[in-house]
Amino acid sequence: MVEIPETLPQRMFLLAYDTRRQRLALRGARLGLVLRAAALTELYLDGRLGEERGKPVVGTDGPDPYGLIAQIGASRPRPWQHWVRKDARKMVRTVRDELDEGGWIRLRPRRVLLFFPATGIEVRDTRVVKALARGASSALQGRPVAHVNSLDAAAVALAAAGEVRTVVPRSETRRRRARIAELTARSGPAAPGLRKAVRQQRASAASASG
C-alpha cells in the first residue's frame, strides 16, 4: 500500500503535479490560492473554523499549522475569498518545503532561459500522485457522496473551483456539475471562496493586460 500525505494542502500540491510532463500543472499565485483554500477547508472540516454571515470565524481549539486561525482571529470579519488570496504565494513555498522535508518531492535548482534561477520539482514516487488521483476520481464518479472520504470529496471540490485540470478536466466539470456541487456542499465554504478568488484573479489579469 502506498503511503500518502495526511494534510489536504500537501495532497492538493501533489494532485497539481502532472506525472506525464513531470512538472506542476499549476504555478505561482493560482496554486497558492488552491493551497490556502485547502488549509481553510481542513480547518473547517475539523471544526477549528466555523462560519457566520458568510465569513469564517474561529471555532474549536486545535493546531494552526499555517497560522490561518491566528490571522482570522486578529482581523475584522472578511469573506472566505480574502483569506484564500492572502499570502497565497508564500503558501506555495511553505507546502513545497514540507513535502521536500517529508521526502515526498525532490527540489532541483535550474535556470529559466539560461539566466534566471528557479527551482524544479520532482515527485519521488509517482504512485503517490496516482493513488491520490484514484481517490479523487472515485469521489467524482463512484460511490454515494455521503460515503466518500471527506478529504477526497474536498480534493474534488477544490480542484473544480481552482481549475486543477489534472484532477477535474474541463469536460468533467461540465458533465459532473451536479456531483461537484454535492461534494462542494459537503466540503464547506472555502471552495466557493476559491472559485471567487480565481475569477477575481482572472479579471485582474485581463484588466492589466487590457
Image: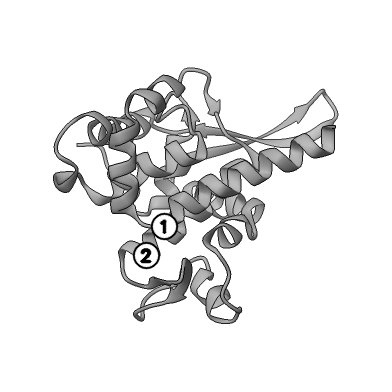
140 sits to left or right of 197:
left
Camera-nearest residue between 190 and 102: 190
Q: Amino acid at mark 1?
A: Pro
- SS type, badge 1: loop
Q: How is the image coloured?
A: one colour
At x 33% / y 53%, what residue is drawn? 187
**What is the quadrant of the N terminus in the image?**
top left
Residue 140, percent across and down?
28, 33
At x 55% / y 29%, what residue is drawn? 25
| CB-based contact (under 8 Å), mark 2 and mark 1 | yes
Q: Is residue 119 above or below residue 166?
A: below
Q: How much space separates mark 2 and mark 1, taking CA atoms?
A: 8 Å
Dot placed on the residue nearer the N-terminal end, 2 or 1 = 2
- SS type, badge 2: helix
Q: Quadrant of residue 120?
A: top right
Camera-nearest residue between 100 and 151: 151
> Which residue corresponds to mark 1?
189
At x 14% / y 45%, what residue is drawn? 147
Q: Quadrant of residue 139?
A: top left
Residue 39, percent across and down?
45, 58
Residue 90, percent across and down?
64, 55
Which dot marks residue 44? 2
Marks counted in the figure total 2
> Within 10 angstroms of label 1, few (less than 14), some, or many (20 or more) residues?
many
65 sits to left or right of 113:
left
> Within 10 angstroms of label 2, few (less than 14), some, or many (20 or more) residues?
many
